[in-house]
């Protein structure tokens, strides 16, 4: 199932990962895990009830066949990135200042 808006999520994740000086493999892991999440629900994370997300993550954490702990963390961290970006977009659309956080930039290696 394709979710066309997913490209926006990927673009925003790419920006944040680059600004934070994280590796391309981190980006690919986040995108892979969020893509599996989006495929499971058939829609973007922001269009899913938070309780459904928690139930999904809890079931995934309990399932002995689920991916490694590292894969689980990549999904959670990727969802956090997406949620942060969504909050920024909401504030900007309302004309409100977006919440700020210390931006840590690392020069390219």
Image (spheres, rainbow, N blue to C red):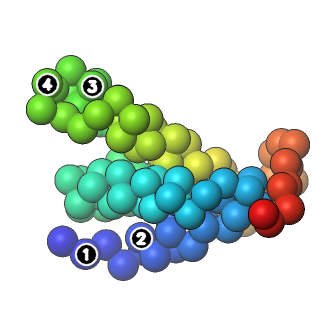
Which SS class for mark 1?
A: loop
Disc 3 + disc 1, Cβ < 8 Å = no
Rate crowding at label 4 as few (under 14), some (14 to 19) or many (20 or more) other CA atoms within 10 Å.
few
In this orientation, which residue lies closer to the viewer: 59 or 29?
29
Tag in front: 4 or 2: 4
Q: How many marks?
A: 4
Q: Earlier in the sequence, mark 3 or mark 1?
A: 1
Residue 87 appears in view: yes
Q: Earlier in the sequence, mark 3 or mark 2?
A: 2
Reading the image, the residue beneath label 2 is: 6
CA separation in Å, label 4 and label 2 = 28 Å
Rate crowding at label 2 as few (under 14), some (14 to 19) or many (20 or more) other CA atoms within 10 Å.
some
Residue 49 appears in view: no
Could you tell me which residue is drawn at 60 percent across and 67 percent down? 14
Disc 3 + disc 2, Cβ < 8 Å = no
Could you tell me which residue is drawn at 48 percent across and 46 percent down? 79
């Amino acid at each position: 199932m394709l979710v066309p808006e997913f490209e926006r999520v990927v673009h925003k994740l790419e920006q944040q990962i680059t600004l934070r000086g994280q590796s391309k493999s981190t980006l690919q892991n986040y995108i892979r895990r969020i893509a599996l999440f989006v495929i499971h629900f058939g829609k973007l994370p922001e269009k899913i009830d938070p309780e459904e997300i928690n139930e999904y993550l809890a079931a995934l954490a309990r399932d002995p066949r689920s991916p490694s702990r590292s894969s689980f963390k990549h999904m959670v961290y990727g969802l956090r990135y997406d949620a942060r970006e969504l909050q920024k977009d909401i504030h900007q659309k309302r004309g409100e200042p977006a919440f700020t956080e210390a931006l840590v930039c690392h020069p390219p290696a």
